[in-house]
Image (spheres, rainbow, N blue to C red):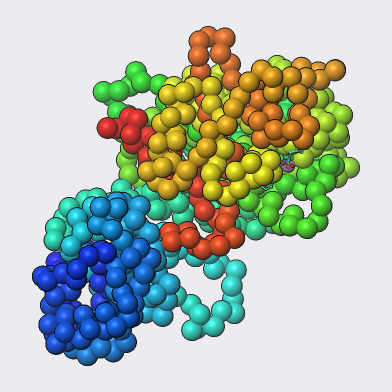
Amino acid sequence: MPDIAFVKPALPRAGILVLPLPEADFPSTGLFAEADAALSGALTRALEAAGFKGRKGQSAILWSPGAGFTKIIALGLGKPEDLNALAAEAAGGALIPLLAQDREATIAAEAMTPTLAASMAMGALLRAWRFDRYRTKEKEEDKPKLERLAFATSDTSDAKHAFAPMRAVADGVFLTRELVSEPPNILHPVEFADRCRALEKLGVEVEILGMKEMKRLGFGALLGVAMGSAVEPRVVVMQWKGAGKSRKSAKPLAFIGKGVTFDTGGISIKPAGGMEDMKWDMAGAGTVVGLMAALAGRRAKVDVIGIVGLVENMPSGTAQRPGDVVKTFSGQTVEVINTDAEGRLVLADLLWYCQDRFEPRFMIDLATLTGAIIVALGHEHAGLFSNDDDLAQRILAAGQLTGEPAWRMPLADAYDKAIRSDIADMKNVGGRPAGAVTAAQFIQRFINTKNGPMPWAHLDIAGTAWTSKDHPTIPKGATAYGVRLLDRLVAELDEG
Ligand code: BES
Ligand code: MN
Ligand code: ZN
């Protein structure tokens, strides 16, 4: 991972110079003009010859152009009026593949505001992350070499100031991506819970519930899912108390994550093809942990609860059967028709527990819950379900601002009918139609509104937790979708 520095604008005498340029006439002042003068106008001539216009995503490379430079990269920023934080991040991200073999570069971001320069650095950082823990034979020439990116900006202290919280959020994103990328033999529920302890050094209180406590509490739904696994389940409760005395009376915000460290489907076993993807069925939990790290890392002035339910869904002689009836922590009973609809069973106990213990201001759960949400929305939006229009609007807005968009889906009694059971209070599947909606309806039955409204939102991230292709700020693999969205939601809500 490269170090990020913000430096005073000065033309480097050697090495690599990156010139981010908007779609406009080439600048007549600043580092661009200085470099062009040092090269007797060869920079302008080369860019014109290459047809470089500064369009978004466009780039041009000049190798060994003279004046000591090994390489000059012109990077298109697009139309000046469209240059916002997301565009700056995308430009920073686009830089990383262009610097694959290089150790350091100076980026002449002096023409951008210091905040946009910081966003560009953030984009570069997010794209530079990779998961190479299990590669032992990678060729030297294939390894990334980047050690330092220096952003030349008019106000280095403003840029550093803007970048500090971004860096904390990036670290949260990396933690999530790492958890989601880990193979399921390594990251089982017990190991996942242990890794949550790392948050303690950021000041997060971490509490791990084991088998005994869950039995005593009566987490019958979660424990039913865990029955087939040789590894015990865990629930981790994380608390960040950042509000301080002034806002002690404010209720905490709560985030709850599905953490199925591997989902075989259980006795309702999945087909073999692509089953390895089910290692990332803990992405909801991974996102909650990364979010806690981000909020604590940037010392957010809010009280936040994070709860993750960690289980492995396996078939075995001790596994739960289709037809079993389990008693949830809420007291409601569930007929388990399909053991592959396990995420909602885990969430059921967590949501009720969270409410019971913390009476939060709102609850947002994240889960790779249904294949049906991928059918509905593909990989472009997460599915958002909510009983509260204000909360839903805030989530949609934060999603737009952070490039992690969500799309609101319906909830209605008509869908709830699909999960009525003949022998228990409900069944855990509602059939093929509107599979993502009936899953959300199931979860909603565990939102207790007896003592007044409880704002709740559910994000089905089955389509957005993992990507099979590179994006400007996300290398292919685990995306950490939701960390930035929810960090932003918290920032806009409580700290503005
Ligand atoms: N973890 C899966 C959902 C999933 C599928 C996530 C594909 C990511 C990619 C979930 O536990 C599941 O198996 N859901 C079933 C529900 C069905 C049995 C009602 C599904 O979507 O097929
Ligand atoms: Mn499943
Ligand atoms: Zn699952």
The N terminus appears in which quarter of the rendering? bottom left
Q: Nearer the viewer, residue 336 or 214?
A: 336
Q: Which residue lies most toward the top here?
A: 451
Question: Which residue occupies 37% across, 40% down?
Answer: 488
Question: Which residue occupies 56% across, 79% down?
Answer: 138
Question: Which residue occupies 81% across, 20% down?
Answer: 421
Q: Quadrant of residue 335?
A: top right
Q: Is residue 409 left or right of residue 16?
A: right
Q: Is residue 174 left or right of residue 438?
A: left
Q: Quadrant of residue 156?
A: bottom left
- How many numbered marks are there? 0
Residue 491 in the image: above or below residue 290: above
Q: Position of residue 14 (x, y in %)?
A: 22, 84
Q: Quadrant of residue 339?
A: top right
Q: Nearer the viewer, residue 398 or 233?
A: 398
Q: Is residue 294 visible?
A: no
Classify the position of ligand 2 by quadrant: top left, top right, bottom left or bottom right.
top right
Q: Is residue 63 visible?
A: yes
Q: Position of residue 266 (x, y in %)?
A: 80, 43
The C terminus appears in which quarter of the rendering? top left
Q: Is residue 176 left or right of residue 98?
A: right
Residue 42 in the image: above or below residue 178: below
Q: Position of residue 377 (x, y in %)?
A: 60, 43
Question: Which residue occupies 33% across, 29% down?
Answer: 494
